[in-house]
Amino acid sequence: MLKSLEKNLPKIVLAPAVGLISWFVYGFVLWTCYISFTNSKILPKYELWGVGQYVKLWASRKWLIAVDNLLIFTALFLIICIVLGIILAIFLDQKIRAEGVLRTIYLYPMALSFIVTGTAWKWILNPSLGIQKMFIDWGFENFTFDWLVNREMAIYTIVIAGVWQSAGFVMALFLAGLRSVEDEIVKAAKIDGAGLFTVYWKILIPMMRPVFFTSFVILVHISIKSYDLIVALTQGGPGISTTMPALYMTQTAFHKSQVGLSAASAMMMFMAVAAVIIPYLYSELRRENAS
Amino acid sequence: MQANTSASSYKQLEQKSKLTNMFLRWFLYFVLILFASYFIFPLYVMVVTSLKTMEEIRQGTLLTWPSALNFESWAVAWGGRGYGAGDTFLRPYFWNSIKMVVPAVFFSTFIGAMAGYVLTKWRFKGDQWIFLFLLFGCFIPFQAILLPMARTLGVLGISNSILGLIVVHTVYGIPFTTLFFRNYYVSIPTELVKAARIDGAGFFKIFFKILLPISAPIIVVTVIWQFTQIWNDFLFGSTFSFGEAAPIQVALNNMVLSSTSVKEYNVDMASAIIAGIPTLIVYVLAGKYFIRGLTSGAVKG
């Protein structure tokens, strides 16, 4: 008895972690999935109702706006963060004085919450006393910068704040990637007469392929889940012009009491994340097994 | 003759390249400093605004330096005015967050350390699948578990309580903490453990005598990661708590959004700084570990 206990001790110690994750992650996702196929309103109902909620979801104007916004935000957020991240990483890699200070400055927003970030940018971007007023006071009398309260442009304020928060992180990933390249490779290329530009463009950047992949996965993941930043910056407004899926999900569940519909939107988000993450995990695992 | 010309032209070339080099250096520093100012700008604005009076805010611009260092907004943000309806301030919520963060970080780190230990030093058939099973939890969008979690907390009678938030943060921290410890222990030679086992050391003795003493770096990384995540969380805090049990990020958001009276941007900015300062301090003091957590939490699978 004692012997078998001792033999199974590792598995017993592992059990709480596996049990909690089975229940709170997998069990809960399955529950949400099931509820998305029912006609649940305030309280969950358990008789199946087919795909009605999904039909309703994709017919909802607000959801379509949310998806549109997500696509715009993800595209811009990805491109700007990666371009900025690479440029900063390459520039910092040139034996720069005070590199540590600069790196600290680029990365500190990552330590702040999205609520703090949103609060700060909301103040900076507000038309009456923020940047707009600054330029008007400087003598640019016709200067307007009202994106925060402009239906067409408000989504871009979220991009500005999101990039501010995350670009430094991409920089750190690329800098680590560049530093891990053997010096010999660069030296050999230079002996062959390659200029610095060619070394980066033809040799180093192509070698950063895994870093691109990682940044892509992380940034897409952040953008699908983005919720706090929108709540703090625009609350989905003006009107519903900056709604995103995560905000749609919580509003539908907790303000409109449409539990079934909100479960359907949560499952759409889940599938979007899975579509990005599963190939990523698969390739990571293969790489680890190969090495 | 021949050699002479080539030498002088080489010199010319060298001079030219020196010039372009200098120009490039200047350009490099210019761009780096330009972006540094973009990143530092909001922090500067926050600090400066929090030190101004509302009168100064209306008269000056975002960048104007305050006429005097006026910490009144900080006092109001932290402790309120002591009168008036809707006199909300951060102090109680700051303590809520502390009471939530400390146990949640402790439990999730402990469970993750144990799981990482088993998965690397007491390997069994299929352990890789268990790891993958746990790892996937890092990536799920929490919206997919929000509804059942709200019901579960209700059934357990701990909705809208700090205890409820401790449970939530502990559970959803486990995938990350497991990942950190697993990846750290995997690089520690298993021979150490095997030798100790032959000497008759048991499961816990090996952990506490051999692995724990060399785990300081990864414990620091994990604690910082979990601390930052939980302190900065808004989704769980705002969904599972309201009123008096709310953590600081929720309280900050409520304070900023409440439109009962005239907007006081100086108090808003002071509040934002108070809510951000603990993680900022951790970042400045232990940036190396913070970055290591970020990159390994995200990069490695």
Image (tube, coloured by chain):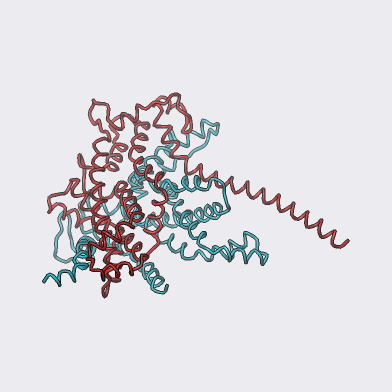
The percent coordinates of residue A154 (x first, y second) are 41, 46
Q: Colour of chain B?
A: red
Residue B283 appears left or right of B94: right
- Looking at the image, residue B11 lies above or below residue A282: above
The percent coordinates of residue B257 (x first, y second) are 31, 38
Q: Nearer the viewer, residue B128 or A249?
A: B128
The percent coordinates of residue B166 (x first, y second) are 21, 50
Quadrant of the frame with the C terminus of chain B: bottom left
Q: Residue furthest front?
A: B199
Q: Nearer the viewer, residue A135 or B46?
A: B46
The percent coordinates of residue B120 (x first, y second) are 30, 67
Residue A232 appears left or right of B197: right
- Find residue A186 and report its image quarter: bottom right
Q: Residue furthest left?
A: A1
Residue B4 appears left or right of B21: right
Question: Is residue A39 among the parts visible in the rendering?
Answer: yes
Residue B99 appears left or right of A82: left
Image point 32% across, 67% down: which residue? B192
- Find residue A26 and report its image quarter: bottom left
Q: Colour of chain A?
A: cyan
Question: Is residue A33 among the parts visible in the rendering?
Answer: no
Q: Residue furthest right?
A: B1
